[in-house]
Image: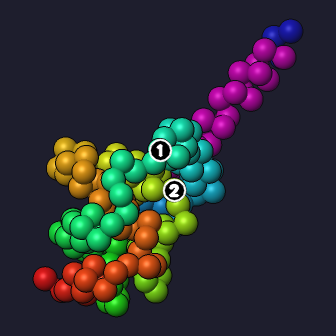
Amino acid sequence: MKKILAGVVIGICLPFVAGYLFVISGRMPVATKGSPLPFEKFLARKAQHAVMDPEAGKPSPLPVDEPNLLAGAHVYQAQCAVCHGRLGQPASAIAQGMFPQPPQLLPPKTGVTDDPVGETYWKVKNGIRLTGMPGYSGNLSDTELWQVSLLLRHADKLPVPVEAVLHQTK
């Protein structure tokens, strides 16, 4: 009986000891160029979707019209473009140095036009832990959060005046 109990205790403790040794040996990727571990990616994705999915289908209270898209373009230029890119421009040095690399959200590498607008709103409002994506709920109004979310949802078919704002470099 004592051997069985000792085997169970060792079986439970061994993975924790191995994980600890892995971390203190310096093999855990911590630099921005390091790849995430498979289990790390799995856990992060599952946790994010468990929280976000119930709110992802939330419809925008604002219409998809030129004034809202223009306002969203101004918010995007001021708050998002440094990481997520400007229209027709390559990724910034800041974006290239981040891990994980932020998606470039404007054409031709449109990132979220197939996502529900509520999902984009949730990400902009709350941010995503351990990615560099901040939450803007304390810095942008709810209207601004929806406007930039609408802009990103419709980034592949924007009116010319909105594209003109997105082409501005400063």
Residue 162 position, x and y percent, is 27, 79
Name the secondary structure under disc 1.
Answer: loop
Residue 55 position, x and y percent, is 48, 41
Q: Write down the quadrant of residue 15 in the picture.
A: top right
Q: Is residue 108 left or right of residue 134?
A: right
Q: Residue at x 24, y 71 (%)?
A: 70
Q: Which residues are magenta?
A: 4-26
- Front residue of 105/16: it is 105
Q: Are marks 2 and 1 in contact (CB under 8 Å)?
A: yes
Residue 92 vertical placement versus 80 (above, below):
below
Which of the colour schemes (rainbow, by chain, secondary structure, one colour) is used?
rainbow
Q: Is residue 119 visible?
A: yes
Q: Is residue 58 magenta?
A: no
Residue wearing tag 1: 58
Residue 61 vertical placement versus 96 (above, below):
above
Amino acid of disc 2: Pro
Residue 72 position, x and y percent, is 26, 65
Name the secondary structure under disc 2.
Answer: loop
